[in-house]
Image: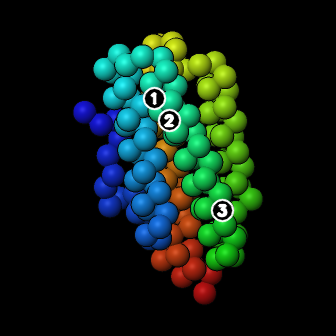
Amino acid sequence: MPLIRWTGAYSVGVPELDEQHQCLMELMNNFHQAMVEGQGRDKLEGVFAALTEYAAGHFRSEEEWMEGQGYPRLAEHRRQHEDLFRRLQELQGKSAAANPALSVSTAMFLSDWLREHILRSDRMYDPRSWKQRAA
């Protein structure tokens, strides 16, 4: 069973970024599934590394899009990304994949963070909302 599922409620109104969010969810679900199936440390670490790498690329892409749109809350949004990326690196350094208890808490933390971040922060840059308010 997936840890997090894409629904239209997560759409930010930018197809490219919606697709990236779907990929992040899929990678998160892959990490969770590998953990649930008791796959080996190397497999879990590989999946976690792929998730971390993809997240970094997504954050860059999202921030570049926001900058190009003149999004007024870019600095705040960038800080949220930096905070999560630091956390991912810490977890990777602690080898979240090697410790089952840490893996469970990591999967829960990441799915909760992604849900909240998309629904609260990312949805704010939906051009259908903030550009209308600014006009």
How far across and down, in percent of the image, does residue 131 sit? 57, 80
Whether the residues at callouts 1 and 2 have beta carbons within 8 Å, the answer is yes
The residue at the far bottom in this view is 135
The label on residue 110 is 2
Can you identify the residue that label 3 sits on? 63
For the residues labelled 1 and 2, the Cα–Cα distance comes to 5 Å
Residue situated in front as seen by the camera: 76 or 45: 45
Q: Count residues near mark 2 (Cα–Cα under 10 Å), then give few for <14, some for 14-19, many for 20+.
A: some
Query: Rounded to the nearest whole Å, what is the CA distance between mark 1 and mark 3?
Result: 24 Å
Write the residue at 56% across / 67% down: 125
Residue assigned mark 1: 107
Between residue 60 and residue 83, name the one nearer to us. 60
Crowd band around label 1 with a 10 angstrom C-alpha radius: few (<14), some (14–19), many (20+): many
Q: Is residue 132 left or right of residue 10?
A: right
Q: Quadrant of the N terminus?
A: top left
> Which comes before the other along the chain, label 3 or label 2?
3
- Which is nearer the eye, 100 or 53? 53
Q: The residue under label 3 is which amino acid type? A: Glu
Could you tell me if residue 106 is visible in this image?
no
Give above or below for 29 relative to 71.
above
Amino acid at dot 2: Leu
Q: Dot 3: what SS?
A: helix
Crowd tier of the residue under label 3, counting other residues whose Cα lies within 10 Å: few below 14, some 14–19, many 20 or above: some
113 relative to 89 in the view: left or right: left
Query: What is the secondary structure assignment of the residue under circle 1?
Result: helix
Q: Nearer the viewer, residue 10 or 99?
A: 99
Residue 87: image quadrant is top right
Which one is earlier in the sequence, the residue at label 1 or at label 3?
Answer: 3
Q: Is residue 55 left or right of residue 60?
A: left
